[in-house]
Image (tube, coloured by chain):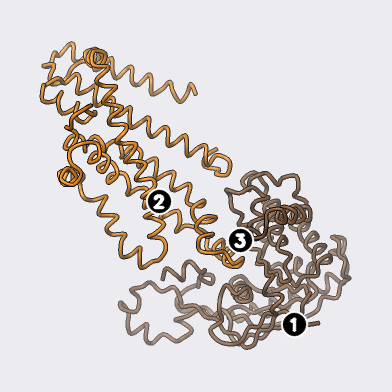
Chain colours: A brown, B orange
Amino acid sequence: MPLAVEMRSVRRAFPRAFPRAFPRAFPRAFHNASHEEREVVALDGLDLTVEAGDFVALIGPTGCGKSTLLRIVAGLDRPDAGEVVVDAAEREAIAYVFQDAHLLPWRTVARNVALPLELRGVARAEREAAVAHALAQVELSDVAGRYPAELSGGMRMRASIARALVTRPRLLLMDEPFAALDEITRHRLDERLRALWMEHRFTVLFVTHAIFEATFLADRAIVFTRRPARVVLDTRIELPEARSSAIRGDPAFARAASELLEALERGSDGDRASPLGPDRETPRAGERESR
Amino acid sequence: MKRVVLPPLVAAIIGLLLWEGLVRSLQPPSYLLPPPTAIAAAARAELGALAAACVTTGRSALAGFALSAVGGVTIAIVLSTSRLVERAFHPYAILLQTVPIVAIAPLLVLWFGVGPRAVTASAFIVSVFPVITNTLAGIRSVDPNLRDLFRLYGASRLAVLWKLELPHATFSIATGLRVASGLAVIGAIVGELVAGFAEGRPGLGVLVMTSYRQLRTDLLFAAVGCSALLGLALFAVVGLGAWLALRRWSPAMR
């Protein structure tokens, strides 16, 4: 299998969100502060390769740098050091799904799904066909003309997935996409996603902190430590390719899940308390700009 | 509807009755405080002049409001293009807000001459600021994730403005326009106090000044009432427009 993503000793750190006056008000404290106290290191010396067509779950404690990793792969963020190579064909067809649906509330579902094609200048007729197909794949055809505010959370998330699928992605990046949904909706979407993957065989990087979801969805699971994210466990999940919810009761499923859980617990130990108080999550693009 | 309309209506009737009763029993000089009935009579007698004044002032206010709507949104878009531009020019936009319009009104007369152009300029200056700040706030509050999404799909700067920033800002622009609509009427009337004495039809501001000079307090009250109604009407029209534009997708409008 060709490689879709290759990362070598990638490092990414963000300046800690000090109040602007801090260095001036406490110059000594600031200059004595170690590197670690002055910046939040999300990734450090991270190596990762992903094969094309693989379904990879990235598991780790909240705020461990998984999102940063995803953003770097997407090209939305750059590493401070190290090398990131995304296969050219995959780079051309990246789709990103956020934790929340992030639909545009002033557009109908169909026009939301059409957005990526619109931005890429795809002709209207072609666009409409692709949108109809994508909506059918997530079973949302009958609400195409509704507005996001009129849908349930699960439906909005499905619309968000349709918006990602409409571009026929080769590389699908998903950042805890179902975290805000209830258990049943979540199981249903997991199944749907797995079926879509079976059909299209795109590469998936699926960030989650839910063990069972990762076990159900992925063929390969990578467990990270707390920040800076290091790999604790990188394993293949040996379950049949076609999966339905029934597999959740399988002993092999339980074994795989407990292996991941054990690794996650191992990685979450050694919680180094910061002398400057708890960090926030990795800063977002907008916040960095304003600093 | 009954619950919305009835209570303020009852309050108004009670207030007017009290006013009438007090004036009749205490009998202050009529140039100080005329009773509502006298005001109504004056309004009926001068109905033509009042209506004409409303049209004149309304025209200037509407023109000033339209200028603020277009100009304010445009200025905000320019300011939003970069932090540097915003830092350089935003203080002067605030200046528009803090300089009292009464103080610059003579300048407007010098620049535009006495007449509707100076009045329109006054309405514009008073009402443009809320449009600028609200639009800017709306554009600034776009979710960074959505910006990322647009970036990921290779959106041009224009596409981001047109398909993300402006639609997202619609809600705050509508708020800005609602505030601006009331202010435009105020600006027009203040402008008329200084610059309204041109040939032709006098506006409400002029009517206020002349009836004050003639100590026709009843007519003055009627003119003030008309200005309030004018402001209310413009506000209602803008509010209706915003509601029509936003009702489908904004939960706050349901």
Q: Nearer the viewer, mark 2 or mark 1?
A: 2
Left or right of A56 in this view: B128: left
How far apart, in angstroms, are the residues tagged by discs 3 and 2? 24 Å
Measured along the vertical axis of the image, is residue A80 above or below residue B238?
Answer: below
Measured along the vertical axis of the image, is residue B224 above or below residue A246?
Answer: above
Visible residue check, residue A34: yes
Residue A205 x, y percent position in the rendering = 71, 72
Please give the residue where the numbered disc 1 appears in the rendered image: A3
Q: Nearer the viewer, residue B34 or A269?
A: B34
Residue B150 x, y percent position in the rendering = 57, 63
Please give the residue where the numbered disc 3 appears in the rendered image: A119
Measured along the vertical axis of the image, is residue A3 above or below residue A125?
Answer: below
Q: Nearer the viewer, residue A261 or A130?
A: A130
The residue located at (28%, 44%) in the rendering is: B126
The amino acid marked with disc number 3 is Leu
Please give the residue where the numbered disc 2 appears in the rendered image: B73
Q: Nearer the viewer, residue A265 or A95?
A: A95
Quarter of the image with the C terminus of chain B in it:
top right
The residue located at (67%, 46%) in the rendering is: A151
